[in-house]
Image (tube, helix red, strand yellow):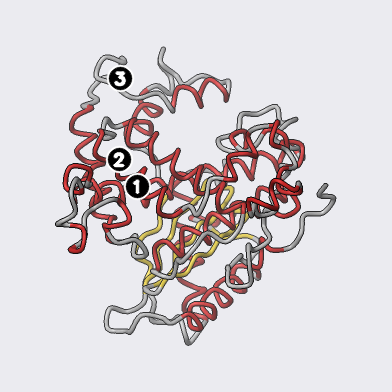
Amino acid sequence: MTYVVTVDAVIPKTASEMDPLQRAGAVALIEDGFASVEAIEGPDGMEVDLLDTIVAVYPGGALLKVFVDAAALEFAEEAVRSVVGELLERSALLADWQVERCEVELHPELAQESLAAADGPDVPPDDLADRKARHTERPTPEDGSDGYDAEAQAELVRGQMLARADQLRSFPPVMFGVLDDEDDDEEGAIESATLPEDAKLAAGALVYATDILVDELFQDVQTLTEEDTTAAECDSPLWHFEDLPERYALQYDARFARRFLVTVIAMTTRFTDGSFQQLSCVAEELALKLLLAETNVTLETFGLLDDGVSAALDSFADNVYEDMDHEWLYDDSMDGIDESAVGEALGVAPMAFRAWFTPFNEGRYVHPSAADEPEGAQ
């Protein structure tokens, strides 16, 4: 079975945060280390296949997503912990780093349900589309899952989100609509302002949803790779690539999916390491659209999406997006507007599929693994 193992590797508490050059060096060392590994020896000599890795480095360490094929979840976690520890020890520059977390993240209620129902009448459906629909339903006390306390789970998730809010370093509360000192005296500003507690929950929810989005995109990449097909022709359900502009669905193959996943990780890394300035390309605009949708769904799932938090997320989107031209990609009647005289007069950036990963200008950052032009793009 395939598992995505999340690893948090952190620098020593006494060390200074890494600057951009040090972070680039850490990425290279970790990626080179993984490149030399084909398989990992798990418990009792059981072999665990290493399928893929994504490395995102921030000032205080690195977040790794390690894709492995293992007989059991425990084998996957133990094997990945072992190989990451060995990779760190191999490098003099990383030898003092510590593995703070190494786990396959599962939503507690779904994991409990799957275990309890394995041989019973409530066994999860075999059909993947039915499973996807079931897992995205909002859990309630009346849904037949014994012992599930919706209020307690909502409070637990709320606490986890609030704890992660400070990780969104690039965005102060004002980006979520909270008044700053200069706005306090403006007429009508107080009535329309976001409460600080709503802004904090919105910020934490974005970080929380980032983990979910990345894991689901990993699954989509694996599905498209195994079926060697595109989103338009894929027989299995996909989490997110069906939500990108439909007119290009025949272009969403495994290679594109990997580049898009790298783009999501690069963008959200800049969100959390404090270096974000502007969205870099059309792909990032679409990635943010998916992240906002995932954030809203996650909050709604646990009953945490009230008017205040929703308004905070709307303010965030308004402040981060420079324009909403990318929405035209979902409207076939606007196809080609970026290449028309009207589009030129309006200053519309190129939006053809071949330009999705092209930086808007020289000052924008696109990850090297995503920057190459897709083969065969039209």
Which residue bears the numbered disc 2?
311
Secondary structure type for disc 2: helix
Q: Residue at x 36, y 26 (%)?
A: 113
Q: Residues within 10 Å of mark 3 (few under 14, many from 20)?
A: some
Secondary structure type for disc 3: loop
3D distance between C-alphas at marks 3 and 2 = 32 Å
Q: Residues within 10 Å of mark 2 (few under 14, many from 20)?
A: many
Task: Check the image and report above or below for 6 versus 299.
Answer: below
Q: Nearer the viewer, residue 264 or 185?
A: 185
Give whichever of discs 3 and 1 has the lower sequence position. 3
Question: Would you identify the image quadrant in which residue 51 lies?
Answer: bottom right
3D distance between C-alphas at marks 3 and 1 = 36 Å
Amino acid carrying mark 1 in the image = Ser
3D distance between C-alphas at marks 1 and 2 = 6 Å
Q: Which mark is residue 145?
A: 3
Q: Nearer the viewer, residue 227 or 49?
A: 227
Question: Would you identify the image quadrant in which residue 45 lies?
Answer: bottom right
Q: Residue at x 64, y 44 (%)?
A: 222
Q: Could you tell me residue 223's position as x and y percent? A: 65, 39
In this view, the mark in front (3 or 2): 2
Quick check: 105 left or right of 80?
Answer: left
Give whichever of discs 3 and 2 has the lower sequence position. 3
Q: Could you tell me residue 206's position as x and y percent? A: 37, 49
Q: Could you tell me residue 182's position as x and y percent? A: 20, 63
Q: Which mark is residue 100?
A: none
Amino acid carrying mark 3 in the image = Ser
Amino acid carrying mark 2 in the image = Ala
Which residue bears the numbered disc 1?
315
Q: Are marks 1 and 2 in contact (CB under 8 Å)?
A: yes
